[in-house]
Amino acid sequence: MNDEIMTIQEVATYLKLNDKTAYRLASEGKLPGFKVGGSWRFRRGDILQWIEDKKNKGMDA
């Protein structure tokens, strides 16, 4: 389900990142997310699209 909402910890685990790295990327606007009550949340579909965009940019270079 692509509308599933993930926490920063879940995104970090999914992307195999440290929690702090995921938080930094989200804070810098490099990882698509939004805040709810001060906590980061991410739509799985947005993360999957972000991955595809990153993969495609690598092929264009």
Image (tube, helix red, strand yellow):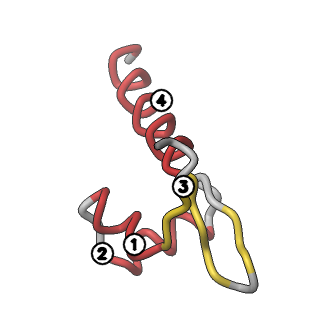
Along the polypeptide, which appears first: circle 2 or circle 4?
2
Label 3: which residue?
A: 31
Q: CA distance from mark 2 to mark 4?
A: 21 Å
Q: CA distance from mark 1 to mark 4?
A: 19 Å
* In contact (CB < 8 Å): disc 2 and disc 4: no
Q: CA distance from mark 1 to mark 2?
A: 5 Å
Residue 24 in the image: x percent, y percent?
Answer: 51, 72
Q: CA distance from mark 1 to mark 3?
A: 10 Å
Q: Secondary structure at mark 1?
A: helix
Q: Return the residue found at the far bottom.
A: 38
Q: CA distance from mark 3 to mark 4?
A: 12 Å
Q: Residue at x 24, y 62 (%)?
A: 16
Label 2: which residue?
A: 18
User: In which image quadrant can residue 33 be found?
Assistant: bottom right
In the image, is residue 45 above or below residue 18? Answer: above
Q: Secondary structure at mark 4?
A: helix
Q: Secondary structure at mark 2?
A: loop
Mark 4 packing: few (<14 Cα in 10 Å), some, or many (20+)?
few
Q: Quadrant of the C terminus?
A: top left
**Amino acid bearing label 4:** Asp
Residue 53, numbered circle? 4
Along the polypeptide, which appears first: circle 1 or circle 3?
1
Q: Residue at x 54, y 55 (%)?
A: 31
